[in-house]
Image (cartoon, grey):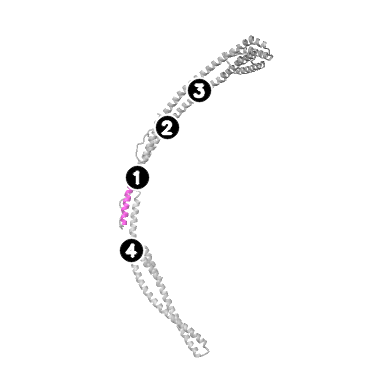
Amino acid sequence: MQTWSLGQKLLVCLTLLAVALIALAGTTNFSAISNKAALATLLADRVQPLRDLKIVGDRYAVDIVDAAHKARNGTISFATAAASVSKAQADISEHWRAYSATRIEGEEAVLAREASTRMQAANAAAEKLRQILLRGDRAALDAFVVNEMYPAIDPETAAIGDLVGIQIEIANDVTAAALTAAGTAQILSIVLTLLGAAAWLVAFVVIRSRVIVPIDQVAGVMETLARGDDSAIPFVDRSDEIGRMARSCEKFRLAAVAKADLEAKAAATHSIITTALQRGVTAVAAGDLRVMIDTAFPPGYEEVRINFNEAIAALRSMVQLVIESAGDIHTGSNEIASASEDLARRTESNAASLEQTNAALVQINARLKSSADSSLSTTERADQAIATVRAGRSTADSAVEAMERVSISAKGIDTVIEGLDKIAFQTRVLAMNAAVEAGRAGDAGRGFAVGADLVSALAM
């Protein structure tokens, strides 16, 4: 059995509504066209001709006859009466032509031909009356009114009356037909309206029961799934769009259940890993570097356990090296301390020698100044005595000897300074080695680093 999709169902419902609306519109249009045709017939073929016939009858019965009697009685002049007759003749001719141009058939055509025949006699009588009035012949007017006017005009007015009567009958028939058509159209409109309402009701029920309610239920289930609740998906066996939506929701539900299982497994795996790592980190924080994670981790996390164990082993080896380096640094520090004490003693001895040398230099300087003064005095007094010259030469020889001794002392000072430079260089090397070992020892070697800095400063 073929099932319809939601689109097909909605199209069927909309098609029913469209058919009902088209039929209702067609009926309304038919009624309007019928009424318009009836009104056009009444206006063009009945009301307008009826007005023309009434004007023709009035002109004969009122204007011509009345003008003749008023002129005879002296109420109006003959000229006025003649003008009234002339105007009546013109109106009769105009409106009879207008009436003759309408649709005339059946019994009306017979009456129209009879009225046209009688009109010839009535028009001849009206023309004769106009000529009498133009001449002002009262005797002829009296004779015309008494003997000729009514026999000529009365048959025409009677024929016009018959035409007016048949116009009224035909108008009644057309009006009745129009009313009948309007009633029929009204009944059809009511029937089509009821059919349209029934079609709308059927479409509403179908759309509500087959579209809106299922969609609302599927939406409710989707909201339930969004909140994390597991609910059965309805309408998965339907083959329309709602069934497709329901099957898609079912896939989402199964995926959510699978995801929840994976998350539970992941949480358990995470708990195992974090517990083992926390235990290992706590042991390391307490100073126990022998801790190892022996429990195997789940696949994908085993490398974390191996890396942790390798990191602890490397940290244990590094701490052992630090301890050994600390011992070496301690031994080196003792040696540096002994060397520093020996260096201090030598430095003190060199300082004493330098002080003595400085004193000797001061004395030499004083002697040089004295020799210079003596040389200047000897030079000034050279012309006074040879003995003084000899004494000056002797003094100069003494000065030369003193200068030689100063030169020898200066060479000894250079040797001392060179020795001090070598000692300072060795001290700086020791201080640098101590600083390197202190840096390798980390926080434990800060004291050695400070001592190395002081030794380096002392060497400078």
Give the residue at mark 4: 324
Q: Which residue is mark 3?
A: 31
Residue 319 x, y percent position in the rendering: 33, 60
Amino acid type assigned to the residue bearing label 2 in the image = Leu
Q: Position of residue 269 (x, y in %)?
A: 33, 47
| Left or right, 164 with reference to 143 | left
Is 263 left or right of 121, judged from the image as shown? left
Q: Tell me the CA gap for discs 3 and 4.
A: 119 Å
| Sequence-wise first label, 2 or 1 | 2
x, y percent for residue 270: 33, 48
Nearer the viewer's eye, disc 4 or disc 1? 1
**Is mark 2 in CB contact (under 8 Å) with mark 1?**
no
The residue shown at (49%, 24%) is 28
Residue assigned mark 2: 6
Tell which circle, 3 or 4, labels the residue nearer the N-terminal end. Answer: 3
**Most foreground residue, 345 or 265:** 345
Q: Which element type, helix, strand or loop, lies under badge 1?
A: helix
Q: Is 259 placed above or below 415 here? A: above
Mark drawn on residue 223: none
Label 3, label 2: how far apart the Cα atoms are: 37 Å
**Range shown magenta:** 267-285
Q: Is residue 452 above or below residue 196?
A: below
On-image quarter of the N terminus = top left
> Looking at the image, is mark 3 or mark 2 earlier in the sequence?
2
Q: Nearer the viewer, residue 428 or 173?
A: 173
Q: Mark 2, mark 1: which one is toward the viewer?
A: 2
Q: CA distance from mark 4 to mark 1?
A: 49 Å
Q: Secondary structure at mark 2?
A: helix
